[in-house]
Amino acid sequence: MNSSAPAVSVIIVNYNSGPRLRRCLDHLVAQHFRDFEILVVDNASSDDSIAKAREAHADIHLIEAGANLGFAAANNLAAKSAKGEWLAFLNPDAYAAPDWLEALLRGAEAYPDIDAFGSTQIDDKDRDRIDGAGDVYHAFGFAYRGGFGQPVSELPPEGECFAPCAAAAMIRKETFLRLGGFFEPFFCYSEDVDFGFRMRLAGARAMQLRKAVVYHEGSGVTGRHSEFTIYHGHRNRTWTWYLNMPLPLLIATAPFHFLLDLLLFAMTALRGEGRAYLRALRDGYGGLPGLSAERRKRQQERTASAADIARALVWSPVQLLHRSPHIRES
């Protein structure tokens, strides 16, 4: 890696990631593209993940947060000191293919007017399955990773996505900082969808790159069905919908959003997760008054019309049920 300002700053947020962090770094140092720096923010881990990682990779730039800041604030902290023109966000349970950064930079060259790029995420434990091909936002107020669980043979073509999944995404640093970075009250989960939504409100777009590949465990640290994941995921789902939907769309989708809340409660209750889900709804809706100023700010500053936003959403319940990708071909 060059001693001068690098092209890319790769940011990894670590919190008790165990051996995953070292494996993630092992894949990064094997990249074909070399003009990058690595910033690891440690959220006061209590395991030996940082010590083991530094034994093998002493040249990483370690930022000691001093407390568990959460995913959003920790990434923002690193972004402020990053030297690269581009910020590549990478989860410690995401393992980059050797040409991952090279493919992202090729995308940036091919689409100079695009400020954010998403990666093809393959299930690390079943590499014949898609873990995500761009974040999709359904009009009812539900975000999902496009193509989750589907065969790799059904990967969509390269094209525009609603938002890139921050498990492995590259965003222009100037744009990231100008829009305020990830929304820190989220703490963890949905902050990437929220940021992608804010980009759309500002008239910017995101591109999903088929050839930029990572192998992702998916909630490998927090657990896909843990109380932490259920609570933060659904609380932040409510906040994302409220903060970003233009008023005509907020009113039009509200009945369906509330119906979806009921359906999701039934599903989580059947899995024994109902209590965490109800806490998420309580704090999600209960927190809306405190977010009203933020909502006003976003809506007053937006340049995209309600129609522009409506066209970027998925409206079909069938697509939601199947977690179908939603890519506009470039």
Image (cartoon, rainbow, N blue to C red):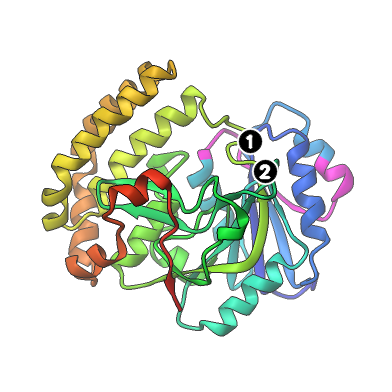
- The answer to whether residue 106 of the structure is visible from this angle is yes
Instruction: Say whether disc 2 or disc 1 marks the residue closer to the N-terminus.
Output: 2
Residue 80 image point, x, y percent:
54, 59
Boundaries of the magenta span: 53-70
Residue type for callout 1: Gly
Residue 126 in picture, x, y percent from top left:
69, 43
What residue is rendered at 58% in x and 31% in y? 222
Q: Is residue 211 left or right of residue 117?
A: right
Residue 7 to residue 52: above or below: below
Q: Decide: is 203 above or below 93.
A: below
Q: Name the residue: 64% across, 75% down.
A: 105
Name the residue beneath numbered marker 2.
93
Q: Inspect the image, locate mark 2, and give the three-letter code of the amino acid beneath it.
A: Asp
Q: Residue at x 20, y 49 (%)?
A: 293
Q: Left or right: 149 with respect to 295? A: right
Neighbour tally class for label 1: few under 14, some 14-19, many 20 plus, Cα within 10 Å: some
Q: Please, what secondary structure does the residue beneath circle 2 have?
A: loop
Q: Which residue is mark 1?
A: 220
| Residue 47 sits in quarter | top right
